[in-house]
Image (cartoon, rainbow, N blue to C red):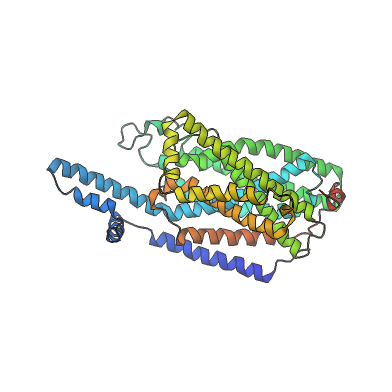
Amino acid sequence: MYTFSGKLKTVSIALMILGALGIGYGFFSAPKTTEDVEQALQHDQEADHGEVTAHAEETTHGDSATEEHSADEAKSHLEHLLHQGQNRPWAAFFIAAFFFLMISVCVLVFYAIQWAAQAGWSIVLFRVMEGITGYILPGSILLFIFLLLSGLHFNHIYVWMAEGTFDATSENYDAIIAGKSWWLNTPGWIIRSFIYLFIYNIFRFMLRKNSLALDKTAEIKIYKKNFNLSVAFIVIFGIIELFMSFDWLMSLDPHWYSQLYSFYVFSSVLVSAITTIALVTIYLKNKGVLPFVNSSHIHDLAKYMFGFSIFWAYLFFDQFMLQWYANIPEDTAYFFPRLLGSYQLPFISMLVMNFVFPILILMDSDFKRVPWFVVTTGIVILTGHYIDIFQMISPATVGDSWSIGIPELASLAFFLGLFIFVIFSSIAKVPLQAKGNPFMKESELYHY
């Protein structure tokens, strides 16, 4: 039986408190008016970074018609920068909320796969997986609050929600987005988001309940229930993940589309989920509460980390290669800021951390059995995929106004602290040995 250590609990609470204070500061310090933006630009100009301000000053010369047009352009640009500045704390919150929730959800997917495949090797890890999925409920609540506030126009994250987008008589009318209004409309979007989150939570509740009941009775009918539930969840998740990725992420830039995008998002969060299972397992093993976990279990988790890192890289290359081969302007607009624009550094960095580093370290089978090697690689992989989610969301919401500062670090700290607190509290509630599972003995004796 694991006991949530006071030291780890203190660290997690401290992260939540510091994160909450930083998130509050991020919203407080965000620009409130275009005058705030002008002052910031003036400050940047003094540091030789004021191209926009310099351009605005240049527009004061010339004939009156040109001056008026330039003034309108400058005003429009300032409003655009204001929205980007106001979006920054919202985007930082969204990135962290989405990342940690989807780690939990994909742990549930991996857990369901073990049940559906009737795998024997992974049974000793079931309580670890169930503990990590305990974050789904609080993570869902926080993310849904963000989505609801977005739908109520508390932010400018989703441009298709702007007033007049679907109105042909408005100056903000967008014919391309209006053609998608049958799907991209706020009521339907909110309802679908609730359904996605409800499905994640109800399946987690039922699978966990049956798993604990199996410990008490060891009845085969309960095992079959979880088998059937797992098969159903895998199919349902595979369907709703396609729509979820479009609703929450791809619609941030509604002019762009990719048929591979949902699979790319899934591969990124799945490898993060498996990495999290490995890190938590190694931590608990070092605490002496997982006596039946051996180097072969660690090896197999690391093998999945390696394999899905390759899968992620395959989808990453395919998505870009198809755009390059077809020369589609809409796709070019998506890749330009990431490959050649202001996001080039995080884009290239996450590619190195998510593909080059794992393939160099985890290709050797012996390294997969060394806990500190797996932990080091896992931290790099999780960092890389967090940056991956960052570069999925930020270009369409924050634009060139992005940076890594208090809002970004505070959101990461808050959700990391909450994640640690919830999963280890969940793990500490029940014994870590799934005694009633018929494959438990096979898992205890597993050797690769």
At 55% from the left and 52% from the top, the residue drawn is 386
* Residue 447 located left or right of residue 143: right
Estimate the x, y position of residue 187 in percent, counting from the top left: 48, 39
140 relative to 319, above or below? below
Circle count: 0
* Residue at point 86%, 43% (across, down): 220
Q: Give the image quarter of residue 138.
A: bottom right
Q: Is residue 113 left or right of residue 322?
A: right
Residue toward you, 81 or 387 = 387
Question: Is residue 26 found left or right of 231 in the rendered image?
Answer: left
Q: Evaluate whether residue 66 shows in this view.
A: yes
User: For the N terminus, which image quadrant?
Assistant: bottom right
Q: Position of residue 234 (x, y in %)?
A: 69, 38
* Residue in the image at 20% along x and 42% along y: 69
Where does the image place residue 13, in percent across and percent down from the top left? 59, 67
Q: Locate residue 54, reporting x and y percent.
A: 24, 52
Front residue (pair 316, 187): 316
Q: In this view, does 161 lie to the left or right of 414?
A: left
**Residue 428 visible in the picture:** no
